Image (cartoon, grey):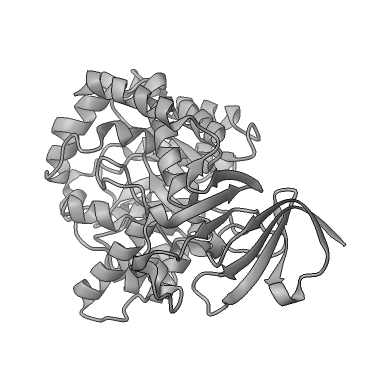
Amino acid sequence: MMTTDILITDGCLLPEPGTDRVTERGYVAIRGGRIAALGDMADLGPVRAREVVDAGGAVVMPGLVNCHCHAAMTLFRGLADDLALGEWLGEHIFPAESRHVNPEMVYWCSRLAAAEMLLSGTTLVADGYFFADAAARAFGATGLRAVAAQGVIDFPAPGVPDPADNVRVAARFLDAWHLRDRLVTPAVFAHSPYTCAPETLQRAKQEAGRRGRLFFIHTAETEGEPALIQDRRGASPIRHLDALGLLDPLTVCVHCVWVDEEDIAILVRRGARAVLCPQSHLKLASGIAPLAALRAQGVVVGLGTDSAASNNSLDMFREMDVCAKVQKAWTGDPVAVPAKSILRMATGEGAEVLGFGGCGVLRPGAPADVILVDRNSPHLTPFYGPDLLVYGTRGSDVRTVIVDGRPVVRDGRLLTTDLDAVMARVRALAARAG
């Protein structure tokens, strides 16, 4: 008899999104935070389970992976809409951050973001911001698996009034969170090549690389970005980073909207990863990233929401839908990036971007990050197959979420957080910011 912690029964099993593997009536057994077994209900033998979850025909699949977010910026959701990126950052977001970002704000606003993500099916997020210690504590308390990255920028920033300390603060964060929480992995986030000098970027990368940690950077987001880069060493942001020796498999280039064939070849040669945030790109009129070309050349690409200030949602189902459709319109090719590829980006490929190769799939031994998506609604009826997860599903269709073998959402209700209390704290902070 198999003994397990949680047994999920009678679900439409989608163990590897992006493939044709679907078991219409399947089970998943979870033990010790890992997938112990899965398969067809007809093959399930005797089981002794501490908890049985009847999926009732819901889709049982890996949790979604949000490869780029600034969680604490939920405080600025809707604060400065309908603006160009330069004006949005320089005249609104940076000033608001200088006035209102502190450990209390980062902690409570990150808890709100974590709640939003868990309730909509995200089980792993890569976050970059200031006071990363507070964000990391918020993710751990809420039960969200996270890569939390300390922000580095070359002017006075929240928690780092002297820019000369920016890399030292990031290095201390890396050391403080080394193996501190099994759900939280520390990293470094250098804001961009136009807000960080070459020497800053190199020192930040060295500190991350010495510890085997990820190095994130916004790059090639807008057409005019090259003219803004300090002491530019290449014709494009990607070539600038390459000239500085920053690109390798532990570097994640976020946005990659304005990249050409040579840039893509460099990313492939160096093994650097890319993350696209299509709704943020559209809202800020940054452009449309050449996703089909990136994938065709072999770049590992993840999908992210960016912040609630530039999106304004952290719902990865919504992000998948927009990503797929905008690529069709931009290329004029309805199969340029099919739904299967988008699903893979939001699960297994996204996990690979973040160095979590075992996540994003359901297989024996993989981390038990599992979501159940209810198909019993008008907008998901009939359900012919997984493509509808991209084109028709909403985050609110997620009913159950398990992270690291622990139920964190049950029947659409968050179990780890008093959500009303968190929203009340954020509203109080917003009253001061507004």
Q: Which x, y percent locates residue 325?
A: 26, 70
Q: Residue 349's x, y, as percent?
A: 50, 63
Q: Quadrant of the C terminus?
A: top left
Q: Is residue 212 above or below residue 389?
A: above
Residue 407 quadrant:
top right
Position of residue 44 relative to residue 235, above or below, is below
Q: Position of residue 204 (x, y in %)?
A: 45, 37
In which image quadrant can residue 110 be found?
top left
145 horizontally vs 229: left or right: right
Nearer to us in this view, 29 or 219: 29
Task: Residue at 59% x, 59% y: name it.
Answer: 357
Relative to 253, say whether 200 is above or below.
Answer: above
Residue nearer the viewer, 157 or 319: 319
Residue sitting at 49 percent across and 38 percent down? Answer: 148
- Left or right? Give the position of 29 relative to 229: right
Which image quarter is the N terminus in? bottom right
Residue at image point 15% right, 54% down: 285
Q: Is residue 382 visible?
A: yes
Is residue 296 or residue 118 the one in the foreground?
118
Q: Vertical placement of 360 versus 71: above or below?
A: below
